[in-house]
Image (cartoon, helix red, strand yellow):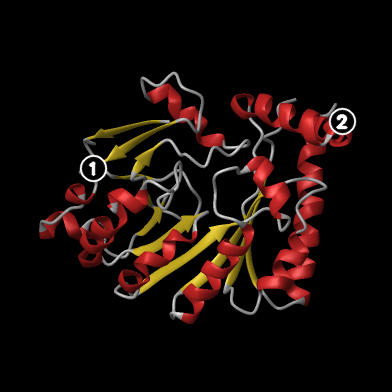
Amino acid sequence: MKIKEIKAKSIITKSGLPDSDFVINPYIGCTHACVYCYARFMKRFTDHHEPWGEFLDVKINAADLIPKKQKEIEKYKGKSITISSVTDPYQPAEKKYQLMRGILKNLIPLEPNLCILTKSDLVLKDIDLFKSFKKLVAGVSLSLLDDNLRKEVEPFASSVERRINAVKQLKKGGISTFIFISPMFPELTDWKEIILKTKNFVDEFWFEDLSVKRANWGDIKEWLADRHPKLLKRYGEIYFPERRDWYDMYLKNMEQQIRLFCEENRVKFSIYFHHQKSLA
């Protein structure tokens, strides 16, 4: 693992995410080494040649880059900020560097609508600072309930049990919570069971399909061939259909199922599917 301390030029950047004006990424790279991670495109903007998941750049001056002058602060008041979009703010290195403590403290005067997304129960260390924000939601991404299966695709992330417990503890602490059911693996993600297991302490469920791109398809294909060869053909049919609109139809069918189930169970939900994104 190659870990390097760097000084960034900026820390709050415009967002390409739906429902988010800005994003903050305290690290470049991520040591969770998820097989499917779409953020590996970040390698194009670095000098790293190591495989994705085997390097990490730590933005040691991240907190200092949060605006402190009143004129700059006004730019972000009431705006939505997501932490993070292409890394995990609570990956193992955060135990040492504590970047999030400084970032959160300096964000308080900006009064943003803050969203914290992670795969780690390390998020609980900052629950005291979360309470300082008028508008904050925190949660985890969770694809699978079988932890052995989870280890296949997210080898160095927190276990399923620890993630679910983290959301439960956040809710007990008075924090608005969500579970991001992402990515949704066809034939493997039991999203209905995730909802039934956690709905008593989750305020909202978000859904995202598995984002297959040329940068990550090779690793996904290798994983399927090695561990789930019977599914390899099915994934090919979904993500490389004979007609481009078939993938869109597949997603629309999934959306309908999600809406019906969530409405029946009276849970709030949002769907963030990548329509027309198949590789065919």
Q: Which mark is residue 233?
A: 2
Q: Which mark is residue 12?
A: none
Give whichever of discs 1 and 2 has the lower sequence position.
1
Name the residue located 24 percent from the left edge and 46 percent from the top edge.
62
- Decide if residue 244 is in sight here: no
Name the residue located 67 percent from the left edge and 49 percent from the top edge.
150
Name the residue located 80 percent from the left edge and 28 percent from the top edge.
225
Question: Residue 9 placed where, x, y %?
Answer: 21, 36
Question: Residue 87 placed where, x, y %?
Answer: 44, 43
Residue 173 vertical placement versus 2 (above, below): below
The quarter of the picture where the N terminus appears is: top left
State which quadrant residue 267 falls in.
bottom right
Question: Residue 52 placed where, x, y %?
Answer: 51, 29
In the image, which is nearer the foreground, mark 1 or mark 2? 1
- Decide if residue 121 is in sight here: yes
Q: Is residue 69 left or right of residue 84?
A: left
Q: Which mark is residue 60?
A: 1
Residue 114 vertical placement versus 230 (above, below): below
Q: Secondary structure at mark 2?
A: helix
Name the residue located 56 percent from the left edge and 35 percent from the top edge.
38
Pointer 1 and pointer 2: residues touching (CB < 8 Å)?
A: no
